[in-house]
Image (tube, rainbow, N blue to C red):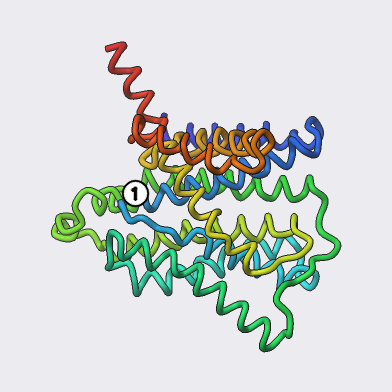
Amino acid sequence: MTLRELLGAIAAGALALAALPWLASDFLLSLALTCLMYIGLAVTWAMFSGATNYLSLATSAFFGIGAYVTAWGFGSLPYALVVPLGGLAAAAFAALVGAGILHLRGAYFAVLTFGLGELVRHAITYSEKTYAHTVGRVLQDAPESSVVYWTVLLVAAAAVAACAAVRASRLGLALAGIGADEERAQTLGVDTRAAKITAFAIAAFFAGALGAAVAVRWTYIEPASVFNPFIGFQTVLIAMIGGAQTLAGPMISAVVFSLLTELLRLQFPYAYLIVLGVLLIVLVLYLPGGLASLVGRWRRVRA
């Protein structure tokens, strides 16, 4: 499938999903919104980490930055402006931090990116207590649920389209070269530093925009809720289970994972994380290439 055909398919799918607020109940609409949020987070994480093999745990930091842009700006700025501002704030932070840490790899990079979320969370908590004399922010006059859904759908569709465009571009080739052999890519003339920072910032933009868009669902925003490490870990698991080297894998996995999490939460409210963890271990042991590897196995069997 060519890039133009793929973008057309993404646009058609987004238009079809846009009718959901008129067809589904509030519960199903909320569940669909969660699926879309993790689709956007997972595909953009896979765009950077799946290609370069840099294990980033900074998704919760970018998501929380976007959410706090909404907490600070919502009311004085329109919702349609707050969402891209949240993405731009997260992208600027990612570019600044990435310039300093993207020379590291492996466990060092993973630990540092995880620490970013904690660093920003404590920094915002300190500044809120010191200057605003509060810890959280109350959001009033939130947009209707359909408006929030359409906004998240638009951001998620843009994230998928951007990832498809990056994979088909010179930047995508550079990222794949970095993942295969970074030193060889540098020898062949690839500006690996610029490629990594650019992709890291693109992924952060969509994570921040999704955080800004979803933040209005909560009446009260505090650092502990929006800088939740579980958001980052779940994003990584979704992308890895789906197949971080593919585009469709994280999308399918996000839907399956979100529905499974909701089902387990209803059936096992006190033990669903244990059940979910066991299922994830089984999947990682027997499907190390993610759900996308099933397609490859099926094709080999047919051949």
What residue does disc 1 label? Answer: 172
The residue at the point 69 percent across, 88 percent down is: 131
| Position of 54 relative to 260 (above/below) | below
Task: Assign the N terminus to one quadrant of the image.
Answer: top left
The image shows residue 17 at horizontal and vertical percentages of: 68, 34
Nearer to us in this view, 12 or 47: 47
The residue at the point 31 percent across, 52 percent down is: 52
The image shows residue 121 at horizontal and vertical percentages of: 56, 72
Q: Is residue 46 left or right of residue 213?
A: left
Task: Assign the C terminus to one quadrant of the image.
Answer: top left
Residue most extreme to the bottom: 130
Q: Is residue 212 left or right of residue 48?
A: right
| Position of 257 relative to 140 (above/below) | above
The residue at the point 67 percent across, 81 percent down is: 128
The image shows residue 82 at horizontal and vertical percentages of: 69, 65
Q: At numbered mark 1, what does the secondary structure look like: helix, strand or loop?
A: helix
The image shows residue 233 at horizontal and vertical percentages of: 48, 52
Q: Residues within 10 Å of mark 1 (few under 14, many from 20)?
A: many
Q: Amino acid at mark 1?
A: Gly
The residue at the point 35 percent across, 30 percent down is: 286
Nearer to us in this view, 159 or 253: 253
